[in-house]
Every structure is written in C-alpha cells, then in structure tokens.
Image (tube, rainbow, N blue to C red):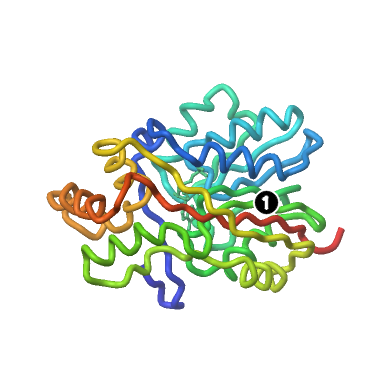
Amino acid sequence: MVTPGGVIVMIREWDATVYDALPLPHLRWGRRTLDRLALTGDETVLEAGCGTGRDTAELLDRLPRGRVIAVDGSARMLDRLRSKLADRLDRADVVQADLTRPLPITEPADAAFSVATFHWIHDHDVLFANIARALRPGAPFVADCGGRGNVARVRAAVEKVTGETSETWHFADPEETRRRLERAGFTDVRAALVPDPARLEPGGQFETYLATVVLGAHLDRLPPSEHRAFVRAVAAELPEPVVDYVRLEFSARRAGG
Ligand SMILES: C[S@@+](CC[C@H](N)C(=O)[O-])C[C@H]1O[C@@H](n2cnc3c(N)ncnc32)[C@H](O)[C@@H]1O
C-alpha cells in the first residue's frame, strides 16, 4: 500500500505457527546479530521486528536486570510471542506498531536490535529516523536484513512466473545504508554484505518455506486458490531447493552521549 504521503507500507500478517516450525536460517542470523551487541545485563533493548520472539527470549537471557521492547506489525506474530514468553512478559513490553511510523515508546531505549525485517520496509530514511528517536544518545544499534543481491535467483524465478518486475523488497547496499544511518543521526557505522544461502529439503518443505517466509507478500496479492500453483511454479524455476540469501549486517551508534 502507498500512503498519501508516498510512503510504501508493507505491514502484513504472517502464519506464525508454520513460521516457527520451519528450519529457519534466521536462528543463526539472530545469534550472529546478538553476538555483535555488547550488553551489561541491565539495559532496555528495542527489538524492531521481533516476530514470534525467538531472539526476544535470547535477549531476555542476556538481560537479567533489563527489559526488551518487542515491536512488530503482525498481530499473529505477537500473539505467538506472548504465548511462548508468557512467564517472562514482566520484563518485555510487546508493542504492535509500524516501524515506518514514529514508535509509541515513552522512555528512550539503551540499544536497538533487528533481524530479517528491514528489507520488508522501503523507506529506510524514515525507518532509521524512527529508531534513532527511540534511542538514548550513544546507544548501539545492530541489525541483519536482506542486502543487495539477496534472493536474486528466487526473484528472477518470481519475475519469470509473473512476467513482472518484483518490487516487494528493498535490498539495500552497505554504502547507501551507511549514508542513511548517518543522516538519521548515527555514527560509527559498519555495514557489510554476507552471502549465506539456505538449503531446504526438496518438495514440501521447500515450498512451505517459500510460501511462508519468502513469497507471503506475493501470495497476498493472489486468491488463495492460486497460492499452491504459484509457489510450485516458482520452485520449479529454481535449479535446487536453495534460497540464495545475501545478508546486510550493520552496526552503528546513536550520536551524542
Ligand atoms: C521474517 S520476519 C523476522 C522475525 C524475527 N526477527 C525473526 O528473525 O524470526 C519479519 C518480521 O518483520 C515484521 N515487519 C515487517 N515490516 C514491518 C513494519 N513496517 N513494522 C513492523 N514490523 C514489520 C513482520 O511482521 C515480521 O514479523
């Protein structure tokens, strides 16, 4: 959807149960991103695009005296997070919000963290400005998302099946990301592309993975009766059951402090 102000908004629902049952490479992306965030254990960390809460739980483990502000746009992802973390919600604020809008957070957080979310958002200037406003000066910000060249083969397969250019994702490159972060008020920016393909089992698992994790926004535009055939057609265009991920990993610090 494009708002009257011209901002592309990609809030959509996810099948949180199927998502959690898949062998997600997001697990290792989450661990890698967490390992780039130095914590003393009493901070409040903003998690942007927390999904079903896998990394929220890991953050809470690393914050015995701290809190997590877990933000996501999907009600179903957040419902699943709430049931998985039911006994830990005293230290987690679960917020349904659109990261392209100013975040409804009253106290600035001490750090920001995000995995596999920002490529779903087209306007990174707005996104980074919103995150900067939610952080105290000096706060670290670490993130992973799809970067330039991400899922290029899958994208080519989609374009072959639809006959149209796919504008669903925004796969930024490190240099433009560094410029955007600096414009939004961040400093000490490091950003790099990391190729990290994921191999699935052929057939049902690969098709379920594509439908749930990669092609959801494409499927939203089709009637349900056409979903299966579309996913099969895309899978058939790929030489092997591999999603050719290229991660954009970056870290920065809110200026000041
Ligand atoms: C692939 S999932 C990743 C979730 C989790 N970080 C993980 O690694 O499993 C992407 C998440 O980003 C959220 N998301 C995408 N665009 C968003 C937006 N504009 N505002 C808030 N959340 C958004 C989705 O709802 C979804 O939960």
Q: Residue furthest front?
A: 239
How many other residues sit within 10 Å of disc 1, few (<14), some (14-19) or many (≥20)?
A: many
Q: Residue furthest top?
A: 87
Task: Indicate the quadrant where residue 65 lies.
Answer: top right
Relative to 238, is 91 above or below? above
Left-right relation of 97 to 39: left
Q: Residue furthest bottom?
A: 5
Image mark count: 1
Image point (53%, 27%), residue name = 85
Between 253 and 45, the one nearer to me in the picture: 253
Relative to 57, is 244 above or below? below
Task: Indicate the quadrant where residue 223 lies.
Answer: bottom left
The quarter of the image holding the N terminus is: bottom left
Identify the residue position indicated by label 1 in the image: 142
Give amino acid for label 1.
Answer: Val
Image point (46%, 72%), residue name = 7
Instruction: Give coordinates of residue 225: x percent, y percent.
Output: 12, 49
The quarter of the image holding the C terminus is: bottom right
Q: Is mark 1 within 8 Å of ligand 1?
A: no
Between 177 and 61, the one nearer to me in the picture: 177
Image point (76%, 47%), residue name = 110
- Under circle 1, the secondary element is strand
Q: Residue furthest right?
A: 257
Instruction: Give coordinates of residue 203: x percent, y percent.
Output: 24, 38
